[in-house]
Amino acid sequence: MLSAFGYVESHREHCLEGLMRLLRQPSISTLGLGLDECAQLLRTEMESVGLAARIIPTAGSPIVFGERRVPGARRTLLLYGHYDVQPVDPLDQWESPPFEPTIRNGRIYARGSGDNKGQHFAHLKAIEAVLATAGDLPLNVKVLLDGEEEKGSPNLAAFVREHRELLAADYVYTSDGPYHPSWRPIIRCGVRGILFIELEVRGPNRDLHSGNWGGNVPNPAWRLVQLLAAMKGPDERVRIPGFYDEVKPANALERELVRLIPLDEAQICRDLGLEALSGEVGLSYYERMFFNPTLNINGLGSGYVGAGSKTIIPSVARARLDVRLVPDQDPDVIEGRIRGFLEREGFGDVIYRPQHRMWPSKTPADHPFSQAITRAVGAGFGEPPIIYPLSGGSLPDYVFTRILGLPSLMVPYANPDENNHSPNENLDIASFFKGIRTTIAVFHEAGRV
């Protein structure tokens, strides 16, 4: 393992050049931009580090798959990542072009640098380092790169079901997202699920003069606001019957792990320009994030909000909502309860448009694989990790834990201020190399669990 670490240090420019090449290739899944070209580039990168690689079509963007089979290996590790990136808007807020990677102050600035190209590329460079110094890996390794994660991975579950044998493994390992605001490494033992929906209320068939028609014509904006207020109270509790039925309290180990996570709520408020945080009374910050579902308004629109005034009754009002789900909650079941709530509360005329969904996913924090990854992160980062029993965000991790029945863990390699999904996305170069070293250690630790 130490010789592989040494290889990485002596090949820093080589590793960075490969990453810069990948970052120059646009791959925006929501726009269908550059995905085939990026998949081809990644297949070439996989082959160059010693993997047998291929591109596998799906109903949407292709999957890039690579593997290395090692004679006599006891274990197989499946690495997941995604090569698609977010749109770059607003472009005028970028200090350098989003697909012209630029190094400033020890960071690479480019779309996809942290989310997720830089992180899964660290996995590939780790494979290269071990093969160059040891001749082979200590376990079989498979790499699955998704081209649609940024739009909900709509075709990943079907792909996994269809290719169970190809993806057969003992463990799954993902590097995505930022680590703790204190810059300490973290291990995420799971993710919340998500149900994304759009609600639309229609009124008159065109915008109307609010003086001539006000008081006689229903206003869809008011009706939408009344619906949203009925769904969630000022106490932050969701009022949809059955919304919390499957929610379970944290166990003793999870409560202890939460207690150990550093937290400075005052600093969070200062950073966000808030007087105070909100949330359900009786739950701590991380209990709300990890163990409680949420109902959130992502977007709300109706009428005229431009310069000056326009006195109208709008013809339509829309809201986009996301529901974050905790283990044992099923997005299909929750969707049924939301639809039932609309009918019972007299909002049956509201148009309900389902968008994407992901099931929650969880691997026990005391699983032997968790213990192995804890050792590996300590070796790669040079300090022990903070362990999150769950993550507040969502990834398609359920395809591995629910469909394949495998333990799955996530270790982010990106800096806390990576600006993922925002202008000036960046990856701290030191973090990139810590990620490569950590992945090398993961191979060794997972190979002997």
Image: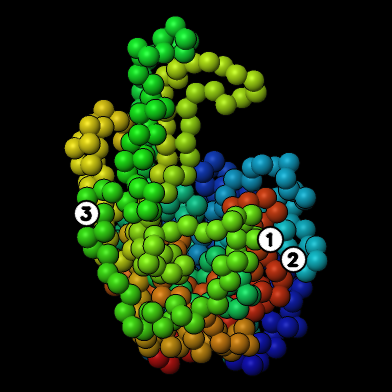
Q: How far apart are marks 3 and 1 (CA)?
A: 41 Å
Q: Residue at x 39, y 62 (%)?
A: 281
Quarter assignment of residue 127 = bottom right
* Residue named by callout 1: 426
Q: Residue at x 32, y 44 (%)?
A: 231
Q: Between tags 3 and 1, which lies in front?
A: 3
Q: Which mark is residue 9?
A: none
| Amino acid found under the numbered disc labelled 3 | Gly
Q: Residue at x 26, y 32 (%)?
A: 347
In the depicted structure, whether residue 363 falls above or below residue 307? below
* Residue named by callout 2: 107
Label 3: how many Cα within 10 Å (few below 14, some 14–19, many 20+): some
Q: What element carries label 2?
A: strand
* Residue named by callout 3: 242
In the depicted structure, whether residue 319 falls above or below residue 60? above
The quadrant of the image that shows the C terminus is bottom left
Q: Is mark 3 on a helix, strand or loop?
A: loop
In the depicted structure, whether residue 136 falls above or below residue 316? below
Residue 325 spot, x, y in % from top left: 34, 59
Residue 179 spot, x, y in % from top left: 57, 71
Q: Do the residues labelled 2 and 1 touch (CB within 8 Å)?
A: yes
| Nearest to the observer: residue 273 or residue 321 | 273
| Nearest to the observer: residue 229 or residue 129 | 229
Q: Which badge, 2 or 1, comes first in the chain's sequence?
A: 2
Q: Distance between the residues labelled 3 and 2?
A: 47 Å
Q: Which residue lies furthest to the right in this view?
A: 105
In the depicted structure, whether residue 331 falls above or below residue 259? above
